[in-house]
Image (cartoon, coloured by chain):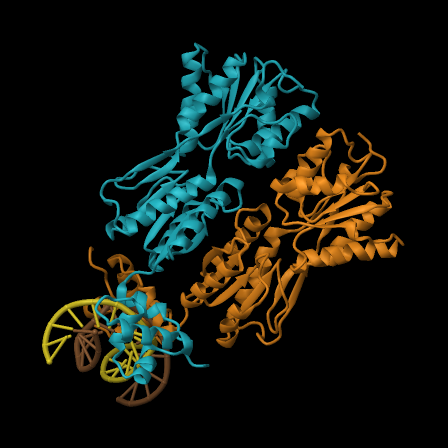
Chain colours: A orange, B cyan, C brown, D yellow
Amino acid sequence: MDKKITIYDLAKVLNVSPATISRALNDHPSISFSTKKRIVSYAQSSGYRINKFAANLSKQKSNTIGVIVPKLNSPFMSAALSGIEKIANEHNYNLIISQSLESEQKEKLNAKTLYDSGVDALMVSLAHETANYEHFDIFREQKIPLLFFDRVDYLPNCPTILIDNKQAGFDATEHLILQGCKNILHVSGYLKRNVYSDRFNGFKDALHKHKIEFNPYNLFETDLDPQKIDFVMDHIKNAKESFDGIFFANDAMAVACIQTLLKEGVRIPEDIKIIGFNNNPVSEIIQPNLSTVNYPGYELGVLAGQSIISHLKGNINIQSAESILLKHKLIVRTSSLKNNVK
Amino acid sequence: MDKKITIYDLAKVLNVSPATISRALNDHPSISFSTKKRIVSYAQSSGYRINKFAANLSKQKSNTIGVIVPKLNSPFMSAALSGIEKIANEHNYNLIISQSLESEQKEKLNAKTLYDSGVDALMVSLAHETANYEHFDIFREQKIPLLFFDRVDYLPNCPTILIDNKQAGFDATEHLILQGCKNILHVSGYLKRNVYSDRFNGFKDALHKHKIEFNPYNLFETDLDPQKIDFVMDHIKNAKESFDGIFFANDAMAVACIQTLLKEGVRIPEDIKIIGFNNNPVSEIIQPNLSTVNYPGYELGVLAGQSIISHLKGNINIQSAESILLKHKLIVRTSSLKNNVK
DNA sequence: TTGAAAGCGCTAACAG
DNA sequence: CTGTTAGCGCTTTCAA
């Protein structure tokens, strides 16, 4: 049991051709039930294991899906990956996961590697930096399904899966307005990325609808790293008119801000009302509980996985790029409430 | 540029043999600098991409590392995976990640799939359930490096990477004792798993050292799912002598408990002192801040990655299984303090 | 330094 | 229903 067993070994012992072995093991219809059974059971007992290198080479497919994410250790992303993995696993696909670490160059490199590795499909959530998409051309030329999730862009024939960030941004902002805020700051991520520009546009729309003027200082673009909360604080302190509401593009930043503000004696929500984004677990823990927008990461992963696998199995017409919008949900907690009921 | 280019195509154009192409592309020493350069540059410009299926088949290796984790969406695990991915990526290894979802059966299936996929090494963090290890035999027979991290067991010649859970459990417990606790409850995970039994043993040792009697009701075994906090609460309420300290095997559970206790008017740390485990981000957010033990997930991932890659590159003698113990650190915050300074 | 040729193990078209 | 026969594209031994 030391050297590896091949279908030729099985063929010799069972007195059939390697082709028959292969067919039996792959449950090919044109093999008689009895030989199939004989072969499968002997293969099992002998400890035979398929060599996927050979099978892949011959079939030119790998049953593998590649994934590129900016960073796999965030609550949102790990939930999404968990959903993707679950679906892939159920359909016997392997998942190769790689991180771009928000670098365009790394994203390109990872894309190349995954291409070379012969992934049957690629799922991408874009890095902050990424500005051009040539590294995906090769996939599209070879008709390898390509899907974007969360941080997306709209390339021809590439499905996208995400929430309606603009509407969500609108909802969050309007909520603050309805709670009485007149001078709202939006702390955004890099506006190059759809998710952040959409949220920002929703923000502006809400202001506009309620006839609140938008000034440049109502927007603060960041990399959303909570370590750098001081920049945000500076912006808040240096405001000509002090803000009475802040809409953060993610919860981590909002939480960091709440903690700093509280330390400085600012009352939340009395002095400043705050809403975040993502429904990160910490939003339910912090005092006051953080209002936020729920972004269903796990469900998104599941849907993304199902979508790509449908493509691979040919159930969906690959030409017709579909975009799936998941439902977001405004979650109102204490941090943004007008009449704070303790 | 539609059909894929092979080394034969390159060979024809450049008037050399496929073997030479292969060698040049792999930077083989016995190829003259000039032809190497000529070949590499033409390969680049022609858009040639290696077919790894063929290369893998020929070399019988894949430059791929398999990983099985119980669940990829926990702060600890996603941090560890992030570290593993970083190292793997830097060394041009792909990472196939799969989840056992705490099921032994799924773990077995995943192990089989990863074996069939020809991973060059396997890294595992065991499922709660897993009781036997036959599914790893095939890796050991084939001399495929196998490494356990965090949730480990000690198989011959299998390196393990984790913290000293027993010592950590001891430290956490002794801390509570030094803060004046006399009747401490330990809320544990499944004691079958090393990490939990070790923490429990540390717990008992600390009690013993300080001459505190251990009774069965001082231990409560759970699956650490914070949704099921009610079972813990019942145990707390039904105690003959009420507990004055609780040591949780993870922070998520501790946080859920704190929230419930506070709602019921129990004061923390005055009435009950609490310490958790993992240094989950929420531990710094909850009021009172949760004392805990830092378990460096990212660093663990990095080390695990480096270790396995050293093995693969032959820098380490595979026979000599090494075990790496990372440093843990007791983090004392408000939830366990005797003289609570607000 | 390069080339010829034999695999690596499986699949699939074609034939029977 | 089963066998024969070519590949799949790259690596590597052996020879030149």
**Up-down relation of residue A329 to residue B42 (above or below):** above
- Residue under the point 41% across and 50% down: B87
Between B283 and B70, the residue placed more toward the observer is B283
Quadrant for the C terminus of chain A, please: top right
Quadrant for the N terminus of chain A, please: bottom left
Between B50 and A143, the residue placed more toward the observer is B50
Residue B145 visible here: no
The answer to whether B127 appears left or right of A134 in the picture is left
- Residue under the point 34% across and 37% down: B153
Q: Residue B13 in the image: state x and y as whole percent.
A: 33, 84
Q: Residue B171 in the image: state x and y as whole percent.
A: 45, 21
Q: Residue A85 in the image: state x and y as whole percent.
A: 50, 55
Identity of the residue furthest to the top in this view: B211
The answer to whether B178 appears left or right of B261 in the picture is left
Identity of the residue furthest to the right in this view: A211
- Residue under the point 59% across and 14% down: B338
Between A204 and A98, the residue placed more toward the observer is A204
Residue B133 visible here: yes
**Up-down relation of residue A175 to residue A320 (above or below):** above
**Up-down relation of residue B24 to residue B334 (above or below):** below
Q: Residue D15 in the image: state x and y as whole percent.
A: 10, 77
- Residue under the point 59% across and 64% down: A131
**Up-down relation of residue B271 to residue A207 (above or below):** above
Marks counted in the figure total: 0
